[in-house]
Image (tube, rainbow, N blue to C red):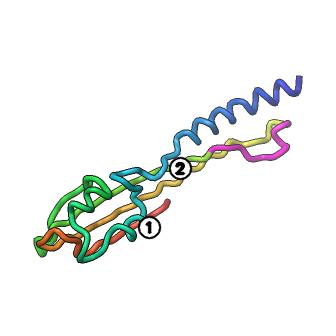
Amino acid sequence: MKQIKLLALLLPLIMISVFLVGCTTPPEKVGNSTLTAGEVKRQVVKGVTTQAEIMSYFGSPNLVTTNKDNKEVWAYNRMSSDAFAGSHGGSLILFGGSQAVTSTTTKSFDLIITFNDKDVVEDYKVVQASY
């Protein structure tokens, strides 16, 4: 009888954990690559890489604008969330003393590229945050 009660307590926690693990977001695949800081360093060379190459590597930008010097600026933004669910309380679960625990981590990745008048990368910045 104790085993049935234990299973009845654990089953909802296991189901929630499986569901939340399935909700995690892998790095976003764009173009022929994954948009990461390492991939940007590998693909983007100031004074060499063209707009057409950037488009083939990373796809269409989220934002296209011009800066104060009237140079074209492309911005890419990706966000992902990782969720974790579990319980904490150890063997106290047998006595109904466990607690459900959930946490979420959100990650932000921004790539900002400035092009010269020949549509070649003049400068770029990568900004990453995790909270």
Instruction: Please give the label number shown on residue 68.
Output: none
Instruction: Please give the label number shown on residue 82.
Output: 2
Q: Position of residue 81 (x, y in %)?
A: 49, 50
Tell me: residue 77, above or below residue 73: above
Q: Quadrant of residue 85?
A: top right
User: Which element is circle 2 on?
Assistant: strand
The amino acid at mark 1 is Gly
Instruction: Please give the label number shown on residue 38.
Output: 1
Alpha carbons under labels 2 and 1: distance apart:
20 Å
Residue at left offset 56%, top offset 47%: 83
Residue 55 left/right relative to 82 = left
Q: Position of residue 40 (x, y in %)?
A: 37, 66
Q: Which residues are magenta?
A: 85-94
Q: Is residue 90 magenta?
A: yes
Q: Position of residue 23 (x, y in %)?
A: 52, 41
Could you tell me if the residues under marks 2 and 1 are in contact, i.e. CB atoms within 8 Å? no
